[in-house]
Image (cartoon, grey):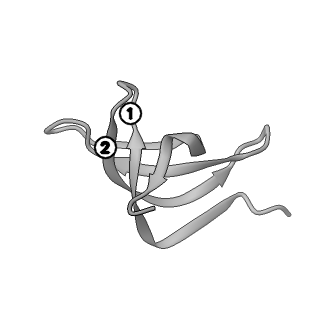
């Protein structure tokens, strides 16, 4: 059976590109394989006070902090 989830333990600090095109600091807890192929990052971040996003984003929407 092919691997469908890769957990990062501990989660990595990342920058995430939000829908508004801006980059926000967050964390990546793992990667999930998509049915059509490819991988998506599981990220958590805040774009404004009181907001919290937990999403799966394409690789081009996430960058490791410090890389």
Q: Point out the residue furthest to the right here.
A: 1
- Which mark, residue 18? 1
Image x and y of residue 58, in percent = 58, 40
The residue at 56%/67% (across/down) is 7
The residue at 39%/63% (across/down) is 66
Image x and y of residue 44, in percent = 37, 50
Q: Categorize mark 2 by other alpha carbons within 10 Å: few (<14), some (14-19), many (20+).
A: some
Q: Point out the residue furthest to the bottom here.
A: 9
Q: Quadrant of the N terminus?
A: bottom right
- Give the vertical position of 1 relative to 15 (above or below): below
Task: Please identify the quarter of the rendering in which residue 60 is found.
Answer: top right
Q: Secondary structure at mark 2?
A: strand
The residue at 33%/32% (across/down) is 22
Q: Earlier in the sequence, mark 1 or mark 2?
A: 1
Is 58 left, or right, of 15 in this rendering? right
Q: Secondary structure at mark 1?
A: loop
The residue labelled by disc 2 is: 24
Image x and y of residue 45, in percent = 32, 47
Q: Are marks 1 and 2 in contact (CB under 8 Å)?
A: yes
Q: Categorize mark 1 by other alpha carbons within 10 Å: few (<14), some (14-19), many (20+).
A: some
The residue at 31%/43% (across/down) is 24
């Amino acid at each position: 059976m092919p691997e469908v989830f890769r957990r990062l333990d501990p989660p990595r600090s990342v920058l995430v590109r939000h829908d508004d095109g801006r980059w926000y600091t967050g964390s990546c807890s793992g990667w999930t394989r998509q049915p059509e192929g490819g991988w998506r990052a599981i990220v958590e971040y805040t774009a404004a006070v009181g907001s919290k996003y937990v999403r799966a984003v394409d690789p081009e929407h996430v960058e490791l902090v410090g890389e």
